[in-house]
């Protein structure tokens, strides 16, 4: 009998029958409040009627129209709709299927545009699982171990993880910017560095908001040295952080923006955006792909962006995120094993540490597993596995946040002792 790969690990025992909004209804007859959203993908909730209608209608017209062979209307509409929310000047878009593909396309573009070989990433970043993307990923060795050699030309700088260092945020930022400058002197010269690649909020690396001052420091150095600033908005974008793009918290703009996950409410599509001038420096034939910009996924993307705008979901993410974080901090006050609560919008991380400040992955895992017992779905993350992440859909209501907090508190009471 054929089965799934034994390497795949199921975070919960739930088998889905159907889902709607913030709820997954299992084949076991139980109703689960979903604070995972397919790892930040179902931004408008499960099966939003407008997204379902758009995808269904498009599937009856044409499912696959390879967009370098024949163009289709949904992709043109999606490009126009994206133009309404992209940072000023990022007026050229290339589409792919996944975040990993978009990351690799952005790196390829930066190297071609600058003629430089090296990419600077930051400790704890997650950028995908394909060979180049895994090389760029430092959120855990499991993503890049066992299939060396990896891609060359990748260098890593420290990330301002203030809680881990035991410093205030500004001290962490100052230290990491100094270390970045030191790397220019000791590892890769600024004139050999094609790009900085960073997430506005770390995903698998622990749900850590990137301090605005650090992004501002990267922008300054990119401008000074002609380095391409690539912002990986795969998880933080599309309203997840309480602003449409996560980098807006820092008041800066990237040279290349990567988007995926929440852009199409569960349909596979990704994109990179850059200025037409920068995008035009890609070599002929370097961009393409059979399934990129799929017609049904593009139609779902148009509908998703419409729902985010019409239902005020960016503002809802901000307000419900503040509510969620405030409730989590009340739970933290009861449980010393919760060392840190942090996040932007509906992207909240709860870090578990022991009395000496060491990572407590065992407790984080118990809490995550126990939330399922209370019909709340959650996930863990972080290089040391000691962070529980909560990622509700942007459509979540005030009452659903309160219910989620109630269930999370009950799980903590049971799992933390």
Image (spheres, helix red, strand yellow):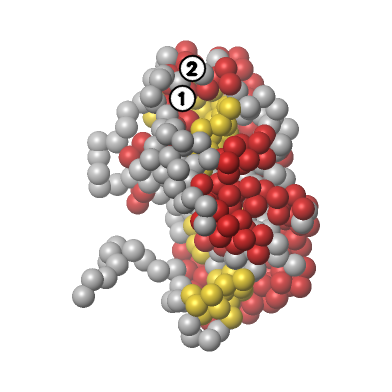
Establish if 64 lies above or below 160.
below
Specify the farthest residue to the left.
1
Q: CA distance from mark 1 to mark 2?
A: 7 Å
When asked about the image quadrant of residue 150, the answer is top left
Left-right relation of 156 to 341: left
Residue 324 visible to the viewer: yes
In the displayed structure image, the side of residue 153 where residue 226 appears, left or right: right
Question: As rendered, which of 166 and 46 lies closer to the eye?
Answer: 46
Residue 58 versus residue 349: which sits nearer the camera?
Answer: 58
Residue 109: mark: 1
Residue 314, compared with residue 47, is above or below; it is above
Identify the residue at horizontal 51%, vertical 47% (top origin). 295
Q: Is residue 182 visible?
A: no
Residue displayed at 55% across by 19% down: 278
Residue 243 on image: x %, y %: 72, 45
Q: SS of the residue at dot 2? A: loop
Q: Quadrant of residue 1?
A: bottom left
* Label pair 1/2, CB-CB below 8 angstroms: yes
Residue 175 versus residue 44 in the image, above or below: above
Disc 1 on helix, strand or loop?
helix
Image coordinates of residue 341 in percent, x first then y, are 65, 58
Quadrant the C terminus occupies: bottom right
In the depicted structure, whether residue 336 falls above or below residue 51 = below
Q: Could you say which disc has been placed on residue 281 in the image?
A: 2
Image x and y of residue 238, in percent: 64, 47
For the point 67% across and 72% down, the residue is 404
Q: Position of residue 247 (x, y in %)?
A: 66, 37
């Amino acid at each position: 009998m054929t089965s799934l790969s034994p390497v795949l690990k199921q975070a919960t025992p739930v088998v889905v029958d159907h889902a709607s909004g913030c709820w997954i209804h299992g084949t076991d007859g139980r109703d689960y409040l979903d604070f995972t959203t397919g790892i930040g993908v179902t931004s408008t909730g499960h099966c939003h009627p407008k997204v379902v209608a758009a995808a269904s209608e498009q599937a009856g017209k044409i499912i696959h129209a390879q967009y370098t062979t024949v163009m289709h209307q949904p992709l043109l509409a999606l490009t126009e709709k994206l133009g309404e929310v992209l940072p000023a000047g990022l007026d050229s878009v290339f589409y792919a299927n996944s975040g990993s593909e978009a990351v690799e396309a952005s790196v390829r573009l930066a190297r071609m545009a600058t003629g430089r070989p090296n990419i600077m990433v930051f400790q704890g970043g997650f950028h995908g699982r394909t060979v180049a993307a895994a090389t760029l990923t430092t959120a855990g060795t499991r993503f890049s171990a066992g299939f060396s050699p990896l891609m060359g030309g990748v260098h890593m700088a420290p990330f301002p993880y203030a809680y881990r260092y035991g410093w205030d945020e500004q001290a962490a930022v100052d230290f990491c910017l100094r270390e970045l400058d030191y790397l220019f002197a000791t590892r890769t010269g600024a004139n050999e560095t094609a790009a900085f690649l960073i997430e506005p909020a770390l995903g698998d690396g622990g749900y850590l908001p990137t301090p605005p001052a650090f992004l501002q420091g990267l922008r300054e150095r990119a401008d000074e040295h002609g380095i391409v600033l690539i912002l990986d908005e795969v998880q933080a974008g599309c309203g997840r952080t309480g602003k449409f793009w996560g980098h807006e918290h820092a008041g800066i703009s990237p040279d290349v923006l990567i988007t995926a996950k929440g852009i199409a409410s569960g349909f596979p599509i990704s994109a990179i955006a850059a200025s037409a001038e920068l995008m035009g420096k890609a070599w002929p034939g370097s961009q393409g792909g059979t399934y990129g910009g799929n017609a049904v996924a593009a139609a779902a993307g148009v509908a998703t962006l419409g729902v985010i705008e019409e239902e005020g979901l960016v503002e809802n993410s901000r307000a419900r995120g503040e509510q969620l974080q405030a409730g989590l901090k009340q739970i933290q006050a009861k449980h010393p094993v919760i060392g840190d609560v942090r996040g932007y919008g509906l992207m909240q991380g709860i870090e578990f540490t022991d009395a000496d400040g060491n990572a407590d992955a065992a407790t984080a895992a118990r809490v995550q597993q126990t939330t399922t017992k209370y019909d709340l779905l959650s996930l863990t993350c972080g290089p040391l596995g000691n962070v529980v992440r909560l990622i509700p859909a942007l459509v979540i209501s005030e009452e659903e946040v309160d219910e989620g907090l109630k269930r999370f508190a009950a799980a903590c009471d049971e799992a933390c002792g």
